[in-house]
Amino acid sequence: MTLTVCTWNINSVRLREPIVLDLLARETPDVLCLQEIKSPVEKIPTEAFTELGYGHMVARGQKAYNGVAILSRLPLEDVTDHAFCREDHARHVAAKLPGGTEIHNFYVPAGGDVPDPVENPKFAHKLDFLDRMADWGRTAKPQRSILVGDLNIAPREDDVWSHKQLLKIVSHTPIEVERLTATQNAGNWVDVTRQDIPEGLLYSWWSYRARDWDAADKGRRLDHIWATPDLAARSTGQSRVARDVRGWEKPSDHAPVFASFDIDP
């Protein structure tokens, strides 16, 4: 079977329920992973999702901040068993699909404005979170797994609109890129998006501050889909960023990212 996964920082699932429903109706991914849902689990609008065929969900919620959820047309087993956040925020949830494929959905801390862990506790928190992800990867040695989410780092020079101008801006600093690379290597993760789209500028986030985000096009690729080598080898090669969604009514500042895999049922 072909498994299509989508990851999207929605910036409030209740506020943006209409565009989540629109995306599900138009794109029909098998699994939708949402970050920054900004809602307790019991207030996520599951009834409308169920009506569209997404009757399975695992989530970790938090009032007004953070929060992650996995919506699925396929049954899910909640396998969340690891704490990555020293602040006890809702930033990770994991589920197992029929057949054994695991989905890990992350919302890495943004890190504030000052890229110095001594001066900025938020940046220190971000680096600590990445270190914990790396430690988990080394210990768990994941297989048949997909890792998605808003990782809040654009690692490559062509993942940002200007490598030179963003080198000292949080999300593209050398120390963040180094930690993200270490996290990726520790779990032997493959960046499926860049495996499928190896060349060229590619963004998934555009600031609300831009008067015309599309024309200015000062984006960053903050949203990622990784997979263990066994699944990365089964990518259908159809990864993409649904850039047009950034222009929908009352949008998130992030666009959804898609990948598909041929997996055993």
Image (spheres, rainbow, N blue to C red):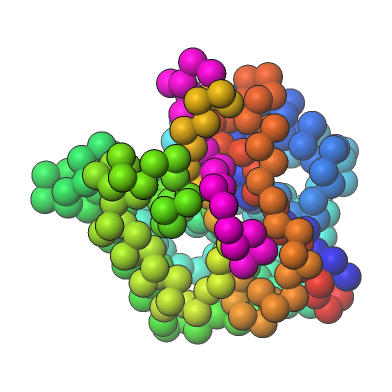
Please name the residue shown 43% across and 57% down the image. Answer: 156
Q: Whole-percent x and y of residue 128?
A: 28, 60
Q: Whole-percent x and y of residue 232?
A: 66, 74
Residue farthest toward the left in the current orientation of the protein: 118
Does the magenta portion include 124? Answer: no
Residue 33 in sight here: yes
What type of secondary structure mainly makes up the magenta span? loop
Q: Report the number of discs.
A: 0
- Quarter in which the C terminus is drawn: bottom right
Vertical comparison of 207 with 233: above or below: above
Please name the residue shown 59% across and 62% down the image. Answer: 198
Please name the residue shown 56% across and 66% down the image. Answer: 191
Vertical comparison of 202 with 147: above or below: above
Which region shows up in magenta?
Answer: 195-212
Viewer-closest of 153 and 214:
214
Tell me the quarter of the picture where residue 24 sits: top right
Horizontal arrangement in the rendering, residue 29 relative to residue 185 (left or right): right
Q: Whole-percent x and y of residue 149?
A: 54, 53
Viewer-closest of 50 and 247:
247
Residue 67 in sight here: no
- Quarter in which the N terminus is drawn: bottom right
Does the magenta portion include 210? Answer: yes
Q: Whole-percent x and y of residue 11?
A: 54, 33
Residue farthest toward the top in the current orientation of the protein: 211
Horizontal arrangement in the rendering, residue 244 relative to residue 81 (left or right): right
